Image: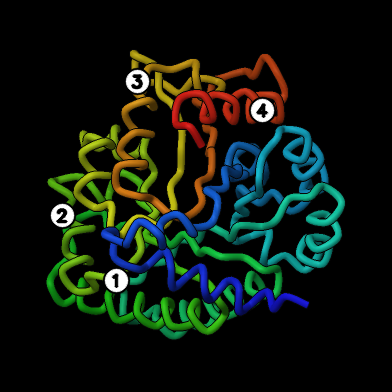
Amino acid sequence: MMNCKSTRREWAQRILAPAALPAIMRAAAPKIRIGAHIWVYAAKQPNTDASEIIERIFLELGKAGLDGVELTHQVVLSESAYPKLPELMKRHRLPVFGSSWSANTWDRTKHAVIESDGRRLIERLGKLGSRVLGMSVGDARRKKTPAEFDDQAAMLRKLMAICRDNGMVMNLHNHIYEVKDGEYDLSNTLARIPAVGLGPDLNWLLRAKVDPVDFIRRRGKNIVYAHLRDQKADGTWPEAMGEGTMDYVAIGKAFHDVNFVGDMAIELAHEKSFVPTRSYGESFRMSREFVRRTMRY
């Protein structure tokens, strides 16, 4: 019988290998899986906690032609939702890629709690066979100091080690604050942890005035995951990918050119006043087909 943790460890070692792999090793790389992050569901729930509707989420996403699902940390830590996940994964044939999580890693006074919470979250994900933790480092709402970046890096190293122990890889998931001002926050983290995995949200890059294609080409050797979302010409979010104007043909080419190995998640988001015209599941199905056509994944 295949050892799930060993398989995930091999995958983790492979995706963090240098980008300039020999052709024979690139050919052996695992399939790029395209899943869905559940934010669009969580956004409408009290405290953005989608635990109460997790069965509906799996039902809709299971019909959308996706390869997996990325959860929010609330669902993984929920005592009501977490026990349901193994059966939902099996019934709908949707593996849990991992989870997103945000903590103020730059604040040294919070480190003990962050490490404790992170260990519980990561160990639960490991038991589900998950591969990734999408980590947001926390917004200080100002430029962090060198000492705070040192503390941030120290906390991230601990979380990276816990992920490794559970056959997973941590990736830095960006919003705007990490990549604005010439990628100030992200660059300071990379200066301290050059080999840390990245999981860029391509639309947040665009909103921070960072060209996603250029980012992929510059940072490609660190990218192990990605969030995909579209944007219309007026700067607002469309209902589904393919209904906006972001150049996903060029984005897809950039990923292929840097020999990307990992998974990706479509993360739909809507403006607060937006009223959907179709189910989220249908929008994810349309988005998945768009990714297949444009990005060739």
Label 1 vs 4, first from the N-terminus: 1
Relative vertical location of residue 63 with respect to residue 49 in this rendering, above or below: above
Q: Amino acid at mark 3?
A: Gly
Residue corresponding to mark 3: 235
Residue drawn where x is 55% and y is 51% of the image: 31
The residue wearing badge 4 is 285
The amino acid on which the numbered mark 2 sits, given as a three-letter code, is Tyr
Which residue carries the number 1 mark? 106
Q: Amino acid at mark 1?
A: Trp
Q: Residue 112 occupies which quadrant of the picture?
A: bottom left
Residue 15 visible? The answer is yes
- Report the Cα–Cα distance between label 2 and label 1: 14 Å
Quadrant housing the N terminus:
bottom right
Q: Residues within 10 Å of mark 3 (few under 14, many from 20)?
A: few
Amino acid type at circle 4 is: Arg
Dot placed on the residue nearer the N-terminal end, 3 or 1: 1
How far separated are the C-alphas under marks 2 and 3? 23 Å
First in sequence: mark 2 or mark 3? 2
The image position of residue 286, as x and y in percent, is: 62, 23
Label whose residue precedes the other's in the sequence (2 or 4): 2
Q: Earlier in the sequence, mark 2 or mark 1?
A: 1
Q: CA distance from mark 3 to mark 1?
A: 31 Å
Mark 1 to mark 4 CA distance (whole Å): 38 Å
Disc 2 from disc 4: Cα separation: 36 Å
Find out whether the residues at labels 1 and 4 contact each other: C-beta distance under 8 Å. no
**Which residue: 21% across, 65% down?**
190
* Nearest to the observer: residue 162 or residue 219: 219
Q: Which residue is mark 2?
A: 184
